[in-house]
Image (tube, grey):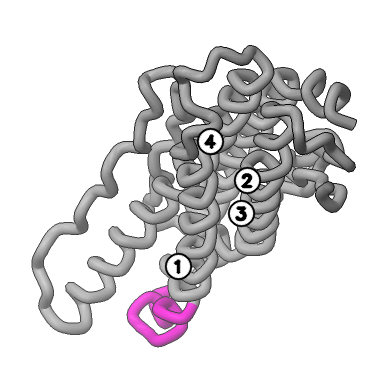
């Protein structure tokens, strides 16, 4: 038996570039844990859905900080002040948590009960869901990690003469090459506040929509398993 869970995902309203929550995966209620696919649903899928919910909610909360960071960056009186470091620290804190949530899903995929070799179509449907969600969550977290790293290096160069280049985060870990991860890239900042705020908003929106689409596709692969296990 597990508590009911709803995976909230992010989608922007047409009139507002800021991502807003929208329903994604269906509710997971009571399950029959004696059936292998139902045990996987209870023990692996449900905690992974919870982790994805956590990551999506953190992203939603930190989304307004990204265009705000662009404002600080383009303000000649703030770009070299503690205000910039504080703004980046808020983003970094959220991203660190999002990355940990994504890794939680990755750990579930290592469980032998959901291995690629399992000859059960329902278990494989659950595996496909976790792969799709993991790839999207990790791609978004990695893009944000890369952004934070580059900004940290830029701040260090100004404050201490540090000259090393920012390290590039590794590619999103593959899962037997079965699922392609979304590619979000990096925002193009030009030093013009209005443009940079818009670019950051667009970047944030692209990540919200990319994750939403991946989670929607994942939903289709598992609905019949949830129904069968209830």
Camera-side residue of 14 and 141: 141
Residue 85 is one of the magenta-drawn residues: yes
- Choose the circle earlier in sequence order: 1 or 2: 2
How many neighbours does mark 2 have within 10 angstroms: few (below 14), some (14-19), or many (20 or more)? many
Residue carrying label 4: 136
Q: Nearer the viewer, mark 1 or mark 3?
A: 3
Highlighted magenta segment, given as a residue range: 75-86
Image quarter of the C terminus: top right
- Choose the circle earlier in sequence order: 4 or 1: 1
- Choose the circle earlier in sequence order: 4 or 3: 3
Helix, strand or loop at disc 2? helix
Helix, strand or loop at disc 3? helix
Q: Nearer the viewer, mark 1 or mark 2?
A: 2
Q: Are marks 3 and 2 in contact (CB under 8 Å)?
A: no
Residue carrying label 1: 92
Instruction: Residue at 66% x, 57% y: name it.
Output: 54
Residue 164 is one of the magenta-drawn residues: no
């Amino acid at each position: 038996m597990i508590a009911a869970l709803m995976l909230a995902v992010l989608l922007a309203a047409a009139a507002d570039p800021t991502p807003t929550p929208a329903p994604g995966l269906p509710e997971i209620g009571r399950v029959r844990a004696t059936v292998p696919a139902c045990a996987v649903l209870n023990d692996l899928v449900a905690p992974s859905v919870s982790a994805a919910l956590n990551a999506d909610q953190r992203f939603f909360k930190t989304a307004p900080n990204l265009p705000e960071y662009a404002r600080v960056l383009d303000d000649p009186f703030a770009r070299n002040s503690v205000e910039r470091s504080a703004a980046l620290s808020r983003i970094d804190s959220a991203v660190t948590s999002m990355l940990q949530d994504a890794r939680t899903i990755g750990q579930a995929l290592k469980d032998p009960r959901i291995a690629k070799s399992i000859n059960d179509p329902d278990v494989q449907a659950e595996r496909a869901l976790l792969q799709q969600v993991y790839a999207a969550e990790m791609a978004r977290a990695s893009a944000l990690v890369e952004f934070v790293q580059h900004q940290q290096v830029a701040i260090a160069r100004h404050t201490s003469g540090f000259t090393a280049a920012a390290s590039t985060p590794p590619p999103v870990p593959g899962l037997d090459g079965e699922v392609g991860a979304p590619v979000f890239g990096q925002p193009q900042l030009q030093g013009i506040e209005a443009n940079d705020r818009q670019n950051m908003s667009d970047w944030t929106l692209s990540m919200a929509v990319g994750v939403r689409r991946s989670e929607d596709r994942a939903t289709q692969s598992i609905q019949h398993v949830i129904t069968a296990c209830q």
